[in-house]
Amino acid sequence: MSNQASSLGWHVINGRPYDIGVALGRAGRDAVHRFLLPSAIWAEINDPVHRGAVATMAANTQRDFPQVWEELEGLAEGLNLPIEAVFAWNCRGDLLAHAPDGCTTVILPGQTPVVAHNEDGLPFFRGHCFMAEVTHSEGRGFTAFCYPGSIPGHTLAFTRQGWVQAVNNLRLLDITPQVPRMVLGRVALNQPNVTDVVALLQRYNECGGFHFSLAQCGQREVTSIEFGGGDAAQRALNVPSVHANHALYHSRGLASQWITDSSRDRQQRGDQLLADGETAPLAILHDQQASGLPILRLSADDPDHENTLVTAVMRLEADGVAWQLYDRPGALPAYDGKLLFAS
């Protein structure tokens, strides 16, 4: 792994779920207390009006995913915050359709598939996000982009199991959540392959909306799955595609979702670039030439209150995932390397 002097942190974390959570919490504690706790979105998420929904999701997480609950308890300990508030924050996309989670993904199937991703989030977290290189005590492992105060699994990740994940927010309306979508994303990272991730999401989808792009070493196709609101729909992609922040084929989402101007413009611009023959991931993800709102989001007055915090290019080779992480356009990768597939 190389590092070109980035503001994006890197933390190596090993151990049991609680230990992993504590380390994640400590890594993000300062930014959470300085920027997140005083914010309007933190107050909105922790409003008592959500208490019943949060309690239901907490009970279901403890019952069905106890290891993730342990990690969340450790996260709260590391953040020096109550578990109730930390858990609620990790339910934000299940409670609010306007939770500040953006993102654009470029999907290039083929002999050596590529999944590339702009991670768009709260601008005040710029310089405070980090990559977590995690090894579970049972041997599973992954590297994921992390926001302060959040568990991994809802952004982008590449795993020692030989597959990658890129996640986009879907703003589904009229949701009655039973389990947090971010908990499902975290459980996904423990799965041995894409098939098992899809099975997980087909079984558990009473949550807010997400889109996962999933690619596995040795497979030409990339799996696209939109889920939430009690339904999941998937496609096997064999041609280049772009996905922004709204459902494209999930029936529940098509019937009731909020499409922001940014999401609509990024989807249209990405589709147009592909139609024009552009397939270079950075050319698409760092594009700012559209007449509407741009794919690369750097504006202080972004209407969704999101900025691009990192761009990842993940290439699935025969023996592992080669990856590059860019924290600013026009520069060398902040980090690059290769995670070998532990067969």
Image (cartoon, rainbow, N blue to C red):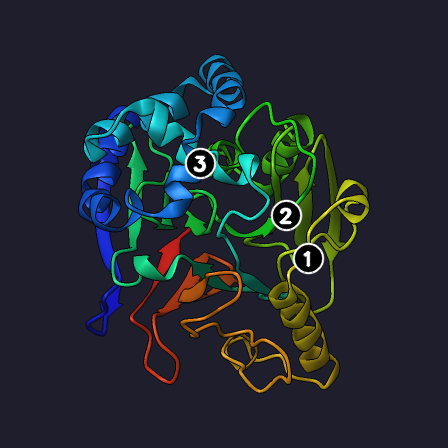
Q: Position of residue 180 (x, y in %)?
A: 52, 30
Q: Locate the N terminus by quadrant.
A: bottom left
Residue at image coords 48%, 52%: 100
Label 1 – label 3 distance at C-alpha: 21 Å
Query: In the rendered image of this protein, does residue 167 appear above or below residue 77?
Result: below
Picture mark count: 3
The kind of residue on which mark 2 rests is Arg
Q: Position of residue 143 (x, y in %)?
A: 36, 49
For residue 67, which quarter of the picture?
top left
For residue 295, which quarter of the picture?
bottom right
Q: Locate the C terminus by quadrant.
A: top left
* Precedes in sequence: disc 1 or disc 2: 2
For the residue carrying disc 2, how many other residues have a C-alpha within 10 Å: few (<14), some (14-19), or many (20+)? Answer: many
Label 3 – label 2 distance at C-alpha: 16 Å
Numbered label attached to residue 259: 1
Disc 2 element: loop
Query: In the rendered image of this protein, does residue 100 appear above or below residue 180?
Result: below
Marks 1 and 3: CB-CB under 8 Å? no
Q: Is residue 49 left or right of residue 237?
A: left
Q: Position of residue 170 (x, y in %)?
A: 63, 49
Res. 138 in view: no
Marks 1 and 2: CB-CB under 8 Å? yes
**Which residue is identified by label 3?**
45
Q: Position of residue 230 (x, y in %)?
A: 71, 30
Residue at image coords 38%, 49%: 144
**Which residue is identified by label 2?**
171
Q: Nearer the viewer, residue 143 or 89?
A: 89
The kind of residue on which mark 1 rests is Ile
Label 1 – label 2 distance at C-alpha: 7 Å
For the residue carrying disc 1, how many other residues have a C-alpha within 10 Å: few (<14), some (14-19), or many (20+)? Answer: some
